[in-house]
Image (cartoon, grey):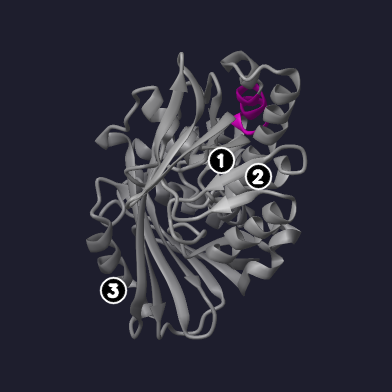
Amino acid sequence: MQRYDIVVVGAGPAGLSFARAASAEARVLVCEMQASVGGNTFSTWLPRDALPGELARAVVQRTKEVKVRGPKSELASRVEGVVLDWKWVVRLLALEARRRGAEIWTSSPAKELLLKEGKAVGVRLEAGSWREEVRSEVVVDASGCSSEWSGLFPRLLGRKPKPEETVFSGEHLLAGADPEDSVEFHFGSYLAPLGNGWVHPFGSGFAVAGIQGLRIHPEASLDEFVAKVRRLGRAAPVASTRGMAVDVSLESFCSDGILAIGGAGWQVLALSRGGLLQAMKAGEMAAKVVLEALTEGDVSKEGLSEYERLWRRELGPDFELERALYSALSRSWDRNVERLLEGMEREPALLRDFAALLAGVEPGRAAKKLLEVLG
């Protein structure tokens, strides 16, 4: 049995940002279920001025234009941005965490939360015939919500997402795509009910196409979406992935000895498919709280609940406004998307705001403006 101050379950942006921030002052172990860090996403897009400097090496292509396609209308605007290779985003965060002292174990699924008198005291890792119990003062659940073994904390609460709360997604990495320096976002209830599709250029000859929505079969919906995108007419998938997210938030993010960040805490933006910047910030905020709790010797729910207060103050307003926009659109999805596009045509700056919102950049500010368009 091994002991650490903190065990982080999940080597995604939230978990690795936590480890990067906490490892200089505590013994941190990051456990990743997969054989490599990088998750089940191929790419993400950000406006150029929102790119964190430490992730510059993950840029695979620069873009000059954003296109938004609704059920009937289409708009485009010059917006300089960058497409990031998601695996390199995560690898760069892992590099920084390791440089600061974190240990990272891959192929180490956390199958069970270890409890003592109701307090989390570690995790049981298991893969094949290998099994290891790791004890810790605090468990940080950053395991996301997209697999059977994700979300230790929601399972502790007995909270399982309902079918109507589950957003399914799929992505193809395609070879043979026409050269483009634009990103595309597609909206329409037929292919992506209460969701959207996207296309990112991914270096010479390659593109990433993805789709997310409620009550969809991701593979079938994705293939149908790709067939409708002109620039992908001669392309073929060379790799595919699928995932899921939860369409609601948990009421609480912590309990005795454990807190949940990012997808594991169902802290997911409704319209933005990446949430990279929010995940990184959540990890950094949680590290500050956990280190203080360890110093004070209080890792109870009350000792860790400062993370909830910080999250609700720093990130909560963005999530609430973005959720309000999503709810307003949902009342009549196709009609309201078209109303937004009409507003963007009258005021082109709104399209740039919408693109930033879809990238998870200041989503509350953009959502507030777009809600005014919908009245």
The x and y percentages for residue 267 are 50, 36
User: Overall secondary structure of the magenta stretch?
Assistant: helix
Callout in the foreground (2, 3): 2
Residue range highlighted in magenta: 307-316
Q: Is residue 40 left or right of residue 348?
A: left
Question: Do we see residue 354 in this rendering?
Answer: no
The x and y percentages for residue 78 are 63, 68
CA distance for labels 2 and 3: 41 Å
Dot label at residue 213? none
**Amino acid type of the residue that numbered disc 1 sits on in the rendered structure:** Val
Dot label at residue 227? 3
Q: Earlier in the sequence, mark 2 or mark 1?
A: 1
- Mark 2, Cα crowd under 10 Å, few <14 / some 14-19 / many 20+, is many
Q: Magenta segment: does it hold 314?
A: yes
CA distance for labels 2 and 1: 7 Å
**Amino acid type of the residue that numbered disc 2 sits on in the rendered structure:** Ala
Q: Does residue 311 sit above or below 28 in this rendering?
A: above
CA distance for labels 3 and 1: 40 Å
Q: Does residue 305 sit above or below 23 in this rendering?
A: above
- Mark 3, Cα crowd under 10 Å, few <14 / some 14-19 / many 20+, is few
Question: Mark 3: which secondary structure?
Answer: helix
User: Mark 2 sits on what residue?
Assistant: 19
User: Mark 1 sits on what residue?
Assistant: 8
Q: Is residue 248 left or right of residue 11?
A: left
Q: Residue at x 54, y 57 (%)?
A: 345
Q: Are marks 3 and 1 in contact (CB under 8 Å)?
A: no
Q: Earlier in the sequence, mark 3 or mark 1?
A: 1
Q: Nearer the viewer, residue 122 or 148?
A: 122
**Amino acid type of the residue that numbered disc 3 sits on in the rendered structure:** Ala
